[in-house]
């Protein structure tokens, strides 16, 4: 089982989205369509750009003492 990603910033969270998407073998364009966003927005998010709101949310949670981690699903695990 993969180790969870510790999230310390909005950029970390955006990169985790990309890792999870790739782990599930979903194309960026298909995922963007499924999410109802432009593919260019999703690309910026996954590369750590356009994350001001996420940075604020992560900063607020960390200020409250929260640990934030993202567990990436293993596509080989049966559901």
Image: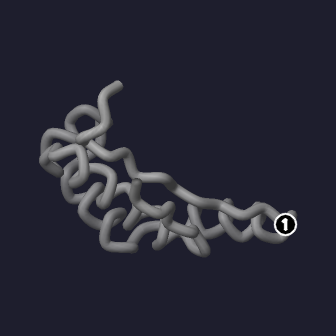
Q: Residue 47: x and y, percent?
A: 31, 72
Nearer-the-camera pick, 44 or 14: 14
Q: Residue 56: x and y, percent?
A: 67, 66
Residue linked to disc 1: 65
Nearer-the-camera pick, 22 or 14: 22
**Snapshot quadrant of residue 78:** top left
Question: Height in image: 20 above or below 76?
Answer: below
Instruction: Give the residue furthest to the top.
Output: 79
Question: Height in image: 29 above or below 67?
Answer: above
**Snapshot quadrant of residue 60:** bottom right
| Residue ID at (61%, 74%) | 8
| Residue ID at (23%, 44%) | 24
Count every numbered label the image shows and give the total. Answer: 1
Question: Height in image: 47 above or below 16?
Answer: below
| Residue ID at (24%, 62%) | 43
**Regarding mark 1 in the picture, which secondary structure is present there?**
loop
Left or right of 67, for residue 65:
right
Q: Pointer 1: residues within 10 angstroms few (<14), some, or many (20+)? A: few
Q: Residue 6: x and y, percent?
A: 57, 69
Q: Residue 3: x and y, percent?
A: 47, 63
Q: How is the image coloured?
A: one colour
Q: Quadrant of the N terminus?
A: bottom left
Q: Quadrant of the C terminus?
A: top left
Nearer-the-camera pick, 49 or 62: 62
């Amino acid at each position: 089982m993969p180790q969870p990603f510790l999230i310390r910033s909005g950029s970390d969270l955006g990169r985790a989205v990309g890792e999870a998407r790739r782990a599930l073998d979903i194309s960026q364009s298909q995922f963007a369509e499924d999410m109802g966003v432009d593919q260019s927005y999703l690309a910026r998010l996954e590369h750590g750009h356009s994350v001001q709101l996420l940075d604020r949310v992560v900063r607020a949670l960390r200020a409250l003492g929260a640990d934030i981690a993202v567990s990436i699903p293993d596509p080989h695990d049966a559901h």
